[in-house]
Amino acid sequence: MSNECLKYASVGICIKDFSGKQITSYNSDKSYTPASILKVVTTATALEILGSDYRYQTTLEQDVNHPNRLLIHGCGDPTLGTEHLDNAPNAFLSQWADRIKEKIDSNKTLDIMVIDDYFGYDDGISHRWTYQDMGNYYAAGAYGISVFDNTYKLYFNTMRIDTCPIIVKTEPEININFKNTLQLNNSGQDNGYIHGMPFSMDRLLTGNIPGGRTSFSIKGDIPDPGMYLGEVLARTLGEKGYKIGKVETSQDDFYRQMYLKDKKFPEGGIFYRHLSFPMKDIIKDTNVRSNNHYAEHLIRTVGRTETNDIYSSALDAGIKKTNDFWKSKGLNTDALMIFDGSGLSPANAVSATFMCDLLVYMQTKSKYASDFMESLPQAGIDGTVKSRLAGTKLVSKIRMKSGSINGVQCFAGYYIDGDKKYAFTVMVNKFSGARSQLVKAIDNLLLSVF
């Protein structure tokens, strides 16, 4: 606490053994912005409520009233076409095309309807996210259909110094209108941002990126993943001999029927079910790589266990379910204030005590204790904490999630060494000075305690 970078900071520290006994603490009952350690709460909740073997389903259906209309019905799978989890991103397209050709006549014009309304549309992003984040890959929306991590790469040539960086291409190819105000820097740092609202194909580029590169990329969010999936599949089917007619999503019908008492939905006969990776793999990637995209789907999926009404907010329901679940397990949730699943919102708040109580619960009372432990990256070895405590006595003995946004640095996890088993949380808000100085101080704290 005497470190210069903590002079004006708020700090919360809690360490408990697995009996729940508090070993040491510092302002541990105060609420602090958690950043990405909130994913510990999200993944634990999803694991407890959905189970480690839960798999999302995306179904291919033939419209019973229009036999040459394909219905693609999504239920929130964040892993469809993912580049993570040892997945081949485009493999599902040819697999789907083969299944479709077995079922639907290729001699007639094929219409495609993507039903992506499972989470609704208005809460695909949290209303507490900041403008600077929206439009970037780490703030991608979460919908009933997500594809390719709802992410594209935007490539530039930055060799010329007399103009803005030259846009070369997007990968995958996607039709977006960019207003380019980017500048070049000599620092080699990526300070480029993509700004834009969900479902808008207009994007503003701000900030600066390294000059002198023949190829440099930044990442943005796919604005309308349901429509994009329909268009990509349409191209694949066109190569298989289909003539494609209308490609649409359920969004127009969703809003048109919003206030109608009697709503009508497409009726389809399922002929193929695409299954996601199991939940234990999804939560591991969520925690190891700090995957915002997966985390946002998880909290909305938890919400849909509370209500299947697509006109209700899946995010609000997930927040309520999370709070209610941990309260039912005897944890004090008074300090828990959440507005998303990933921790991206600076409005989120939680106490170090609550985090430790949840961590202790997951190892002493959860039947998914092993899967949860495995989901946390090992300090000095992998994930976002690969450089933390490397080469020290704590390597292989600490698993922890990191969390960082502007002015925030947090860590939460476990120290395990034989019979010595502890849960710990360190939360720092509004620090000054270099982040590297702060994380080194936290490293030293953990080395001195354990």
Image (spheres, rainbow, N blue to C red):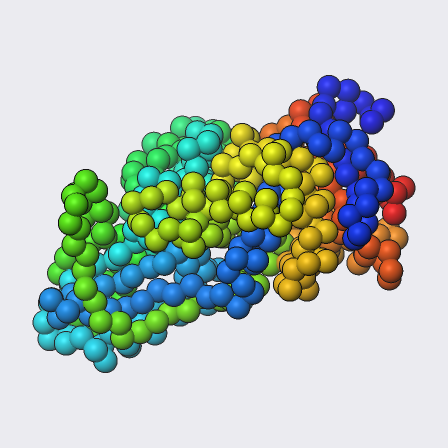
Residue 193 in the image, given as x and y percentages of width and height: 47, 34
Residue 259 in the image, given as x and y percentages of width and height: 19, 40
- Compared across the picture, whether 326 is left or right of 439 comes to left
The answer to which quarter of the image holds residue 275 is: bottom left
The answer to which quarter of the image holds residue 107 is: bottom left
Residue 381 in the image, given as x and y percentages of width and height: 74, 56
The residue positioned 17% from the left and 67% from the top of the image is 63
- Closer to us: 97 or 18: 18
- Compared across the picture, whether 176 is left or right of 242 comes to right
The residue positioned 35% from the left and 71% from the top of the image is 273
The residue positioned 37% from the left and 35% from the top of the image is 196
Decide if residue 157 is in sight here.
no
The residue positioned 46% from the left and 66% from the top of the image is 55
- Compared across the picture, whether 152 is left or right of 399 comes to left
Residue 254 in the image, given as x and y percentages of width and height: 22, 46
View extreme (bottom): residue: 102
- Closer to us: 319 or 377: 319
Look at the picture and state if 44 lies above or below 95.
above
Look at the picture and state if 409 lies above or below 59.
above
- Closer to us: 53 or 171: 53
